[in-house]
């Protein structure tokens, strides 16, 4: 247990509740402790799923270690709910900390790795990190990069027509921003008189698999591309919690209030390489946002080292319990293969009962189960 002294109470939380500072920006103590806990839980979940991929308890791994500072700041500030009055999230495969910040239990991340039938995002069909959550307006993440950028103006258009302050948030990587879908997002969200409330986030980790960003980008910052479309934006150090929090806040406030797009480029780390396909080994030469934040918390006197250790231990216990539970849950069966694959529609003139139209397929029978 932490000792009681001038700075720390018996819970290890500072009695003076100092703020944490980055440049001229600050965040209150309580918020920092909340963010730290989410960052650590997300990291431990990710690292455990890497281990699962190497020990045969799952297959492919991809995820967001190194993006926790930014992604947590994003998730905690989302106007969370279902339908166009709330924010829509068109995410990519490194947004696990955003989901944990929204309230996803770590067991649900583990379930997608283990591909159990209980995986709420894809019923064991999709890769880890491919989230989908209707109640929180999280559209299904795709492996095909950048397609989320052409869908984002669609939800934003509905939100603009409806009124209210719901916004659309779309995230993607630096390499993906070279694709036409990214340009489509810029074009569609900035048409004069028809601007859309889209927060366009580029998490720039400096790599597209094994291709370096510096060998591909003639522009100084990806964010500068917005200038040609009159889209406001900024670059932020995505490893800095306080800076990320405020940059997200500025972007969200602007989209909510002005009903216009904002382009936010976050410089982040990629701490385990691209995916399990490249080995998912920890890299030594990139900044770790958790270590940076913990140094800051200690420096500020907000917590002591023991309290930080406790947060890690609790996260490990939570994740281990989740793995134990999930590995005993049912796997999908052969009969599940075609379930929920297509959405039949009564307005489909050709195949009102069966969108696939395949002879002898069992969809109708499965639906009636
Ligand atoms: C349309 C498409 N092209 C290529 C790929 C293969 N691919 C998967 S991830 C990736 C790199 C993406 O890099 P970036 O956008 O920077 O995101 P990061 O993985 O670095 O977060 C590529 C090229 C793909 N999945 N989809
Ligand atoms: Mg990248």
Image (cartoon, helix red, strand yellow):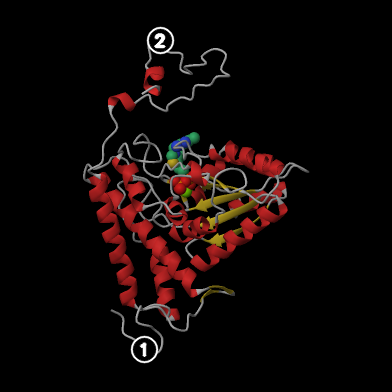
Q: Quadrant of residue 330?
A: top left
Q: Is residue 221 left or right of residue 269?
A: right
Tell me the tag on residue 361: none
Q: Residue at 47% across / 17% down in the picture?
A: 354
User: Which mark sits nearer the N-terminus, 1 or 2?
Assistant: 1
Return the x and y of residue 164 as percentages of the image width and height.
68, 49
Q: Residue at 31% across / 54% down in the picture?
A: 47
Disc 1: residue Cβ within 8 A of ligand 1's nearest atom: no
Return the x and y of residue 317 as percentages of the image width and height.
26, 60
User: Please, which residue is most extreme toward the front here?
Assistant: 368
Return the x and y of residue 303 as percentages of the image width and height.
39, 77
Image height of 348 relative to 191, above or below: above
Mark 2 lies on a secondary structure that is loop
- Whether residue 286 is visible, yes or no, is no
User: Please, which residue is most extreme toward the bottom here?
Assistant: 6
Residue at numbered disc 2: 359
């Amino acid at each position: 247990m932490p000792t009681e002294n001038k700075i720390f109470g018996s819970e290890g939380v500072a009695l003076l509740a100092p703020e944490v500072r980055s440049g001229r920006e600050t965040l209150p103590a309580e918020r920092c402790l909340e963010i730290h806990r989410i960052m650590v839980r997300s990291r431990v979940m990710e690292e455990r799923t890497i281990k699962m991929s190497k020990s045969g308890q799952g297959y492919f791994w991809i995820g967001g270690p190194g993006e926790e500072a930014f992604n947590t700041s994003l998730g905690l500030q989302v106007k969370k709910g279902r339908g166009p009055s709330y924010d829509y999230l068109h995410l990519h495969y490194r947004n696990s900390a955003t989901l944990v910040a929204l309230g996803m239990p770590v067991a649900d991340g583990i379930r997608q790795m283990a591909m159990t039938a209980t995986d709420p995002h894809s019923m064991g069909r999709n890769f880890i990190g491919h989230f989908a959550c209707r109640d929180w307006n999280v559209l299904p993440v795709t492996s095909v990069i950048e397609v989320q950028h052409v869908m984002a103006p669609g939800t934003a258009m509905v939100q603009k027509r409806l009124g209210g302050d719901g916004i659309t948030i779309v995230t993607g990587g630096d390499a993906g921003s070279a694709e036409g879908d990214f340009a489509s997002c810029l074009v569609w969200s900035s048409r004069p008189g028809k601007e859309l409330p889209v927060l366009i986030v580029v998490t720039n980790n400096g790599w597209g698999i094994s291709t370096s960003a510096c060998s591909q980008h003639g522009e100084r910052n990806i964010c500068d591309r917005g200038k040609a479309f009159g889209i406001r934006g900024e670059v932020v150090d995505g490893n800095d919690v306080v800076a990320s929090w405020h940059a997200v806040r500025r972007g969200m406030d602007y989209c909510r209030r002005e009903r216009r797009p904002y382009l936010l480029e976050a410089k982040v780390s990629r701490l385990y390489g691209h995916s399990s396909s490249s080995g998912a080994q920890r890299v030594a030469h990139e900044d770790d946002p958790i270590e940076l934040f913990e140094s800051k918390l200690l420096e500020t006197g907000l917590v002591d080292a023991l309290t930080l250790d406790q947060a890690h231990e609790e996260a490990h216990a939570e994740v281990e319990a989740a793995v134990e539970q999930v590995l005993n849950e049912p796997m999908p069966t052969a009969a599940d293969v075609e379930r929920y694959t297509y959405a039949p529609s009564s307005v489909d003139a050709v195949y009102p009962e069966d969108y696939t139209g395949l002879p002898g397929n069992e969809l109708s029978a499965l639906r009636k189960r």
